[in-house]
Image: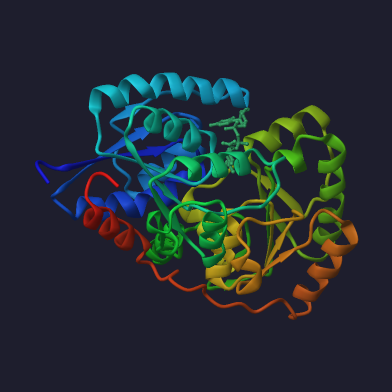
């Protein structure tokens, strides 16, 4: 190989940041790699972006496209048209994308069309639910990528079933769990438990943690009100902390839905405070993808407020239970957890804190082009 191996790493939305942090750290350990970091600006609020950079030691991006919010087509089109001239000018040897957000597919498409190889970290996850925008992003990104880095065995099977070449697929583990294991000792120093009155000295009170941001759950007033009315019943028994995503906040502002005083709405949290709460929670209720994995890694019971998951290992091996949004199912599963009969899980294979090392090793072994 002549010169350094130039890798353009792409981030856009909050969940991309804990995935890119260990990869950049690992690339920086290899002088033969020149990592470039590009932020599309899909997320731009301090609490959804900047705080993650500072807490996780992610270097300042070389470029921020500042695309902001919009419809799916608007956001994707803005990223596509803005990234193309940058890739043409910079000519990286590889574009590395993570996850399943609009930035992931938009940059992959631009790169593939101009003949730049694409690496997709978190490839092959499938909910088989095409009403989820992320599912469309996943399928299309995986159809374009030359390196497909999978977190779990089901993802490998999905990619093979879709006809992707076996030699493109690498089961490497989970970079988000690399971050979790790396930052957990720092998260334990967080004061968030004191600030929220959940901690007395060293001992924590029982509490639940709720996150909601899927369009299917929060964009309809009726659906959101239905979910929050069950959470109100749970909040009678145990305080619930609810860091509210801007999409959900917007809907709550419009509708003025009331809720129980023990359901505590707060601003989105930074990575370390959120990880601290996740690790200490009695139960977690969520519709996030990543949180299903983080709770499995932490051994904390998780109830997923969706009918499907693209991360089945969290159900087959981890602490995750799919409860959908049916009130009686949510209540029954909650009561089991509060009675100490929550599901026990184990850490899935290769979720050991070394996924980024494996990814960089594969990339270096294969050279700049697949
Ligand atoms: C996006 C991802 C989703 C991911 C989620 C994590 C897609 C299709 N969706 O969803 O997969 O789970 O991020 O958060 O890529 N907003 C702000 N400040 C911001 C960003 C957004 O207030 O910094 C508000 C805007 O009103 C915006 C809305 O949130 O319209 C939705 O943002 P958007 O990026 O479109 O989707 P998310 O719901 O955040």
**Where does the image place residue 99, in percent across and percent down from the top left?**
50, 46
Residue 125 appears in the rendering: yes
Q: How many marks?
A: 0
Q: Quadrant of residue 231?
A: bottom right
Residue 46 appears in the rendering: no
**Where does the image place residue 332, in percent across and percent down from the top left?**
85, 69
**Where does the image place residue 189, in percent across and percent down from the top left?**
43, 63
Vertical placement of 265 versus 365: above or below? above
In the image, is 151 to the left or to the right of 25?
A: right
In the image, is 368 to the left or to the right of 289?
A: left
Q: Residue at x 56, y 78 (%)?
A: 346
Depth check: 275 or 157 in front?
157
Most extreme residue toward the left, as rendered?
A: 2
Q: Residue at x 51, y 65 (%)?
A: 152
Depth check: 60 or 75 in front?
75
**Where does the image place residue 214, in percent across and percent down from the top left?**
69, 43
Ligand 1 - quadrant of the structure image: top right
Most extreme residue toward the right, as rendered?
A: 328
Q: How is the image coloured?
A: rainbow
Q: Residue at x 61, y 53 (%)?
A: 126
């Amino acid at each position: 190989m002549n010169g350094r191996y130039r890798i353009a790493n792409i981030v856009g939305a909050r969940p991309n940041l804990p995935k890119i942090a260990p990869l950049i750290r690992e690339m920086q350990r290899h002088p033969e790699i020149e990592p470039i970091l590009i932020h599309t600006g899909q997320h731009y609020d301090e609490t959804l972006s900047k705080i993650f950079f500072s807490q996780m030691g992610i270097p300042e991006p070389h470029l921020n496209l500042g695309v902001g919010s919009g419809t799916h087509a608007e956001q994707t089109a803005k990223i596509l048209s803005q990234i193309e001239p940058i890739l043409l000018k910079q000519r990286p040897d590889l574009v590395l994308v993570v996850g399943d957000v609009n930035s992931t597919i938009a940059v992959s498409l631009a790169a593939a069309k101009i003949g730049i190889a694409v690496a997709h970290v978190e490839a092959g996850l499938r909910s088989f639910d095409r009403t989820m925008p992320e599912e469309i992003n996943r399928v299309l990104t995986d159809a374009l990528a030359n390196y497909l880095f999978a977190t779990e065995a089901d993802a490998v099977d999905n990619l093979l079933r879709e006809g992707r070449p076996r030699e493109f697929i690498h089961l490497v583990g989970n970079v988000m769990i690399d971050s979790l294991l790396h930052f957990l000792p720092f998260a334990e120093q967080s004061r968030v438990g004191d600030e929220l009155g959940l901690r007395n000295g060293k001992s924590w009170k029982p509490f639940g943690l709720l996150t909601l941001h899927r369009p299917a759950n929060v964009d309809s007033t009726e659906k959101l009100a239905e979910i929050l009315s069950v959470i109100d019943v749970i909040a009678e028994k145990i305080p619930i902390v609810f860091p509210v995503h801007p999409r959900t906040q917007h809907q709550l502002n419009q509708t003025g839905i009331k809720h129980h005083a023990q359901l505590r709405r707060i601003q989105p949290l930074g990575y370390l405070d959120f990880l601290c709460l996740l690790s200490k929670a009695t139960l977690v209720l969520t519709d996030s993808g990543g949180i299903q994995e983080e709770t499995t890694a932490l051994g904390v019971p998780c109830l997923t407020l969706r009918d499907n998951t693209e991360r089945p290992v969290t159900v087959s091996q981890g602490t995750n239970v799919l409860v959908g949004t049916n009130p009686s199912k949510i209540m029954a599963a909650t009561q089991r957890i509060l009675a100490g009969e929550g599901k026990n899980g184990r850490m899935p294979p290769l979720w050991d804190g070394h996924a980024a090392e494996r990814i960089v090793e594969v990339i270096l072994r294969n050279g700049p082009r697949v």
